[in-house]
Image (tube, rainbow, N blue to C red):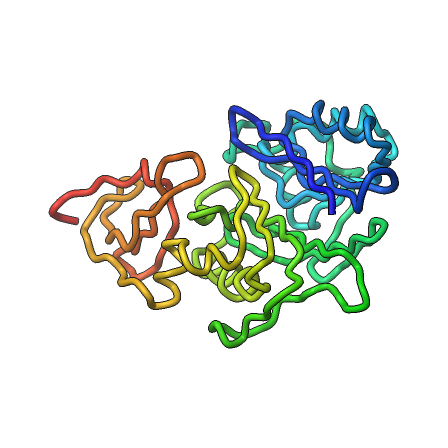
Amino acid sequence: MLVESASNPQFISNTYLLADGVGGPAFFIDAGGPVQPLIATAERIGLTPTHILLTHHHYDHVCDVGTLLERWPELEVLISARERELIESAAAGDGEGGGAGSGPAAGWGAIEAGQSLSFGKLDVRALHTPGHTAGMLSFLVAERSGEDAPAPRAGGGRSARRGGGGGAVFTGDTLFKDSVGGVKAPGHTTYTDLRDSIMGTLMELPPDTVIYPGHAEQSTVGREWEHNAFVRVWRGLDPEGSEPCTALGEPATLVLLGADYDGGTKAWVRWKDGSDDIVPGSRVERSARA
């Protein structure tokens, strides 16, 4: 499996170019730019991209779709129907906080959880991983062999996790190295959705599955299972915190202050009504009283 990436220096967002080797069909996952290095790579090694698969609608993941379409007008752009609705209704913005601003999405096609595509020897399966956004997709990519590509299974716990042949999963803004996505960006759903997407879908993949996140560095399922602070608390290995704080201007309890992909922090907070959220650590004020 050939995986080339380019990172936007402003957003630290990743665009990926995938193929089963030199020459032949290829596809992109997300298009947050800069895509020119990936265009040059595709041309140099004789790849023929046919699709752009989008994890979600935020600007930092779609802003260079137009540039790729200028180079390959026949590219098919696929996004979940819910995310397509969100991008069509969102105003242009920047970072995680805005819509595309890169042209109408009406001509984009839809791909939904459970659907699969093939590119040469690569099989791609869409997984629904909501939380950061309602229609967020992760893409599980495996090289075809005599066996089916690995699939997530229901249920939790290490005994349910499969070993070997993990391939790769492109997680958008659901799961990062040492961190998780927030649930306060435009189009978000809930903390529970995010937790279940990670623990019930992504952590059920084989431990050697390589994680290619929407931002910053790659990881593996096994590494995040052991070292991601959020996953460790969800597994019951580490305790929840109980420190009073103010989050987004409201009194709350700081359950966990963890790392974030940009070198900052991500906070898991619990509100007075017992509900939970994942918010930027910069929006949390720590104090001796709630």
Kindly identify the residue that appears in the image at 69 percent across and 59 percent down: 113
Q: Nearer the viewer, residue 14 or 130?
A: 14
Q: Which of 173 and 48 is in front in this view?
A: 48
Kindly identify the residue that appears in the image at 27 percent across and 60 percent down: 240
Vertical relation: 217 (above or below) 156: above
Q: Which of 156 and 226 is in front in this view?
A: 226
Kindly identify the residue that appears in the image at 60 percent across and 71 percent down: 153
Vertical relation: 19 (above or below) 101: below
Q: Horizontally, is 209 left or right of 52 in the view?
A: left
Which of the 4 quarters of the picture holds residue 235? bottom left
Task: Report x, y in % for residue 254.
Answer: 26, 51
Task: Report x, y in % for residue 139.
Answer: 67, 52
Which residue reaches farthest left? 288
Task: Report x, y in % for residue 148.
Answer: 76, 67
Task: Report x, y in % for residue 146.
Answer: 81, 67
Vertical relation: 87 (above or below) 144: above
